[in-house]
């Protein structure tokens, strides 16, 4: 990224598609601060939104498929305030800061700031489950069920809060990529190439 320019990338998709690695690689290349929405949402379980530094979040791989994560997801479906707080914090930082890359499931629809680049990456359910299973040393068939349950909970929350058809509506996205046949480096190279074209335009 050239000196004096700015960039805000929003990465969206499902676990196992390669989001976290893509975020890290793009952040390193373009010198962007990383924001992981799922990490903020996890912190909201125990902390007030105002005390969380959203630019110091870490990817929370594996936690959401744990018993604690599953229980928390059930609580979220009954109390939508945590998701509202999360989205409020993300919109606030997008409005005030530049040079960010955000891993979020709602910001592609909610954030309207000019110049945002919104990217959707996905893969088939079985491939995503196998990737997460390899990463976390778990049974992929069990993970397939757990990931589906979490996705259904999230879909209901986003539909109820914002009318978002998550996983069906791709209108907000500048880049849509299926990663079934791509490794991590290939995903990065393909997305970065598309970003460069968008910036040039």
Image: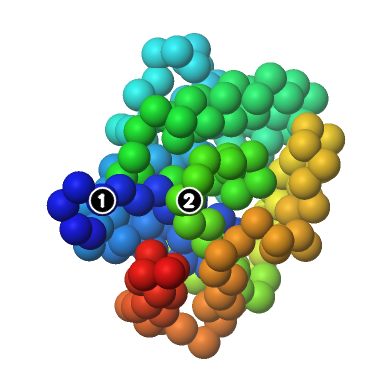
Image quarter of the C terminus: bottom left
Q: Which mark is residue 198?
A: none
Mark 1 highlights which residue? 5
Residue 190 or residue 113, whichever sits in front: 113
What's the CA distance linking mark 2 and mark 1? 13 Å
Residue 188 or residue 17, whichever sits in front: 188
| Crowd class of label 1 (few under 14; some 14 to 19; many from 20; radius 10 Å) | few
Write down the quadrant of residue 28 in the picture.
bottom left
Write down the quadrant of residue 176 in the picture.
bottom right
Q: Which residue lies furthest to the left in this view?
A: 3
Residue 177 or residue 140, whichever sits in front: 177
Front label number (2 vs 1): 1
Give the answer, above or below, for where 83 lies relative to 150: above
Residue found at x 58% / y 41% = 112
| Crowd class of label 2 (few under 14; some 14 to 19; many from 20; radius 10 Å) | many
Mark 2 highlights which residue? 116
Residue found at x 40% / y 48% = 8
Q: Residue furthest front?
A: 201
């Amino acid at each position: 990224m050239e000196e004096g320019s700015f960039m805000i990338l929003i990465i969206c998709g499902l676990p196992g598609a390669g989001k976290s690695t893509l975020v890290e690689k793009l952040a390193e290349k373009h010198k962007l601060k990383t924001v992981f929405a799922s990490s903020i949402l996890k912190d909201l379980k125990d902390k007030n939104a105002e005390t969380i530094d959203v630019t110091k979040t870490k990817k929370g791989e594996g936690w959401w498929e744990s018993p604690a994560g599953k229980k928390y997801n059930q609580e979220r479906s009954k109390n939508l305030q945590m998701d509202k707080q999360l989205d409020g914090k993300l919109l606030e930082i997008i409005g005030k800061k530049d040079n960010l890359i955000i891993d979020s499931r709602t910001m592609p629809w909610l954030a309207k700031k000019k110049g945002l680049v919104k990217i959707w990456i996905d893969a088939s359910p079985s491939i995503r489950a196998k990737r997460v299973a390899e990463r976390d040393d778990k049974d992929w068939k069990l993970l397939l069920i757990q990931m589906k349950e979490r996705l259904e909970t999230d879909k209901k929350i986003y539909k109820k809060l914002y009318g978002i058809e998550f996983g069906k509506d791709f209108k907000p996205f500048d880049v849509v990529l299926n990663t079934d046949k791509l490794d991590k480096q290939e995903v990065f190279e393909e997305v970065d190439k598309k970003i460069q074209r968008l910036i040039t335009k």
